[in-house]
Image (cartoon, rainbow, N blue to C red):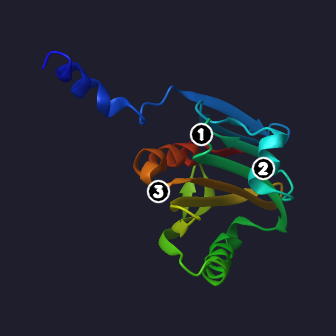
Amino acid sequence: MKLFFPLLIFLPYIGTAQTGLNKIILLDGKVQFSAPKELSPITDEAWKVKYHDMPKPTLALSDEAGEINLIVDLTKQPATEDQLDSYRDFRVEKLKKTIPDIKILSDSVKSVNGRKIGYIKFISQASDQNIFNYYFFTVANGKILFFTFNCIETLQKPWESEADKIIESLRIK
């Protein structure tokens, strides 16, 4: 029992404790946000293994196990903030057409730090388990800046709130 009690106190922190945030600056200082320190850049080799011939985006981060991923890319899609509702609707319809087993959890456009940010949260099926996906997007340099956050569904509870923190920290100049 002496060994068991300290484990009960410590166990809730395993897998959910965050070690802090890294400030990320992209697009010549025009985009800034914070990301959990557990996420580090995906090497070119690891990118090729995981994503094959897909071009590497502006930023690709993952945890050591490859179970949590954050990808950020400035698309070629021109847009204004007023078009984010329509862009979100377009993305939801495209997801429904391309992922037959998709389960949309929520989608909307909200204001964060004076900017409109659209988001879509959904569950999709990987080959061996469910994946929690959290897409969020805004406008930077007159184009869609797209964030893809995903993790295995068993990690959704602690990591969804971390993805929310990324969004809340987002600053666009």
Spatial CA span between label 1 and label 2: 14 Å
Tell me which corner region of the image, top left, top right, bottom left or bottom right, holds residue 158: top left
Spatial CA span between label 3 and label 1: 14 Å
Give the answer, above or below, for where 7 lies relative to 45: above
Tag 3 and tag 1, C-beta contact below 8 Å? no
Query: In the rendered view of the protein, which quadrant contains the N terminus?
Result: top left
* Tag shown at residue 65: 1
User: What residue does disc 3 label?
Assistant: 153
Tell me which label, 3 or 1, sits earlier in the chain.
Answer: 1
Q: Position of residue 56 (x, y in %)?
A: 84, 51
* Residue 95 is at least partly visible in this image: yes
Q: Position of residue 86 (x, y in %)?
A: 66, 78
* Number of the front mark, 2 or 3: 2
Q: Position of residue 126 (x, y in %)?
A: 58, 64
User: What residue does disc 2 label?
Assistant: 49
Give the answer, above or below, for where 155 lies relative to 87: above
Q: Residue at x 53, y 60 (%)?
A: 131
Tell me which corner region of the image, top left, top right, bottom left or bottom right, holds residue 7: top left
What is the crowding at mark 1: few (fewer than 14 residues within 10 Å), some, or many (at least 20)?
Answer: few
> What amino acid type should be assigned to the residue bearing mark 1?
Ala
> What amino acid type should be assigned to the residue bearing mark 3?
Glu
Query: In the rendered view of the protein, which quadrant contains the C terminus?
Result: top right
> What amino acid type should be assigned to the residue bearing mark 2?
Val
Classify residue 16 as left or right of residue 76. left
Q: Residue at x 50, y 49 (%)?
A: 164
Question: In terms of secondary structure, where does tag 2 sit?
Answer: helix
Question: In terms of secondary structure, where does tag 3 sit?
Answer: helix
Tag 1 and tag 2, C-beta contact below 8 Å? no
Q: Position of residue 98 (x, y in %)?
A: 67, 79
